[in-house]
Amino acid sequence: MKSISTKPNSTKANKTGSWRTYKPEFNHEKCISCGLCSKICPEGCILMEKIKNFDKEKPMVDYDYCKGCGLCASECPVKAINMEKDF
Ligand code: SF4
Ligand code: SF4
């Protein structure tokens, strides 16, 4: 019987970014570097990284794997993430 589910541990092989219709845009000025978005992203595609012009680490997304679920945006305590249409 055919299955529509994918094998466990196959995220790397399945670029879930192709599922996306909205993508998260991060406001690094507003972000307080709490790291919550990185911890809760179901695809594990947000990494906290040191970037230019900021003392603290900021979230960076691997859009190959972001499926556009919006969880990061809904949970960010300071609303530093906006979901925008991804054409
Ligand atoms: S949840 Fe919001 S404030 Fe926290 S690191 Fe992510 S973007 Fe920044
Ligand atoms: S929209 Fe969903 S998959 Fe994309 S970075 Fe946010 S939590 Fe992760």
Image: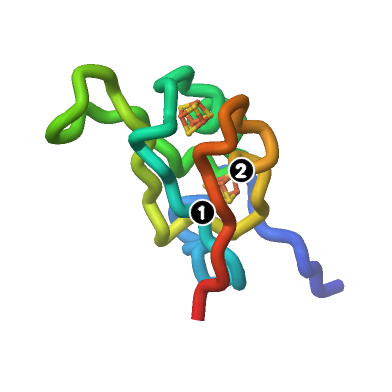
Q: Hey, what amino acid is under mark 1?
A: Pro
- Mark 1 to mark 2: distance in Å? 7 Å
**Label 1–label 2 contact, CB within 8 A:** yes
The residue lying at 58 percent from left, 36 percent from top is: 79
Q: Pick the residue in front: 18 or 69.
A: 69
- Pointer 1 local density, CA inside 10 Å: few below 14, some 14–19, many at least 20: many
What residue did someone put label 2 on? Answer: 73
Which circle marks residue 24 in the picture?
A: 1
Left or right of residue 53, residue 32 in this image:
right
In the rendered image of this protein, does residue 75 appear above or below residue 5? above
Q: Is mark 1 within 8 Å of ligand 2?
A: yes
Residue 54: quarter of image: top left
Q: Position of residue 8 (x, y in %)?
A: 64, 45
Q: Pick the residue in front: 77 or 18.
A: 77
User: The residue tagged with tag 2: helix, strand or loop?
Assistant: helix
Q: Is mark 2 within 8 Å of ligand 2?
A: yes
Image quadrant holding the N terminus, namely bottom right
